[in-house]
Image (cartoon, rainbow, N blue to C red):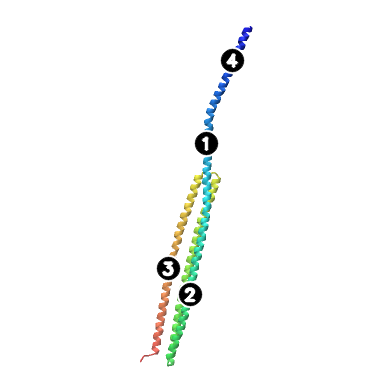
Amino acid sequence: MKTHYKKNILLTLGVLAVVSLIIPMFVSAKNSTSLATVTPNINAKNKKANTVNATTTADKIICDRLISFSANVEPKITGLKTKLKEKRDEITNKIETGREERDDKLSTKREQWDANRQEQFAKLLEHAATDSQKQAVAKFKNAVEAAILARRQAIDTAIKTFRDGVKKAISERKTATDNAVKTFNDTVATAKTKAQDDCANGVDPKTVRLNYQQALKAARDKFQSDKKDIEKLHGSIEPLITAKKLATEKAIADFETAVEKARTDLKAAFPTE
């Protein structure tokens, strides 16, 4: 009995000893198997996380660059407006200065012509020996004065018509240019706002960038098209120049015709022997 019990104890101890050896081995094997299985999963997750982080960072960079680029566009547009205003002021000043100089020269010449003409009338009157001759000189003087007045009025009207036309053409060009710049500016601003909103709402940055680039290209193309149309307005000046030239030539021709008739009538009062 004791011997059997002892054997049972020894067997139990032996089993425990074996189990004690097997359990660590099993646990170790299990842990090893678990780590071997889990480690790739962890690595995959880390890789995925890194990829996501990298993608997120890249996406953020794209959005940041878009915002930065769009912010740089605004000063350029402001610079364009400033240069445009400076150019307009320069052109306006040149036009006004040129007109003032031409008006002053014309006024000075007319005063000189008037003075010389009065001297010629006085000399003619000195040669008038009879009342009929004196009347002929007075008639000649009135005819010449009327012809000169008509010529001046015609030329002044031609000048005013030309200047009014130029002013209108400049105004139309200014309006068209302002509209073109405003359309471009508004389109760029809208594209910027949309890009910012899309980035904030998680739209694929590549799509955001593509849409933004397309919007800017459309804005530039529209501006270039508007610019060509504006340049065509320059052609509206040519007809004004031609009309002024023709009106001036007609005024001079009418004047010469009237003066020639007055001269013929005057000669009739002073017969040559």
Side (left or right) of 245 relative to 184: left
Q: Picture coordinates of residue 225 (x, y %)?
A: 45, 57
Q: Give the alpha-carbon distance from disc 2 to disc 1, as whole Å.
A: 82 Å
Which residue is labeled 3 in the image?
239
The residue lying at 41 percent from left, 78 percent from top is 254
Q: Give the alpha-carbon distance from disc 3 to disc 1, as whole Å.
A: 72 Å
Could you tell me if residue 203 is visible in this image? no
- Marks 3 and 1 close (CB-CB < 8 Å): no
Which residue is labeled 1 in the image?
48
Image quarter of the C terminus = bottom left
Q: Give the alpha-carbon distance from disc 3 to disc 4, as whole Å.
A: 120 Å
Could you tell me if residue 254 is visible in this image? yes
Which residue is labeled 2 in the image?
103
Disc 3 residue type (three-letter): Pro
Q: Give the alpha-carbon distance from disc 3 to disc 2, as whole Å.
A: 22 Å
User: In what element is the residue under mark 1?
Assistant: helix
The residue lying at 53 percent from left, 55 percent from top is 75
- The circle on residue 15 is 4
- Decide: few, some or many residues near mark 3? Use Cα within 10 Å; few <14, some 14-19, many ≥20: few
User: In what element is the residue under mark 4?
Assistant: helix
Specify which label sits upstream in the sequence, 4 or 1.
4
Seen as rendered, the residue at the extreme left is 273
Circle 2 or circle 1, nearest the eye: 1
Circle 3 or circle 2, nearest the eye: 2
Disc 4 residue type (three-letter): Val
- Marks 3 and 4 close (CB-CB < 8 Å): no
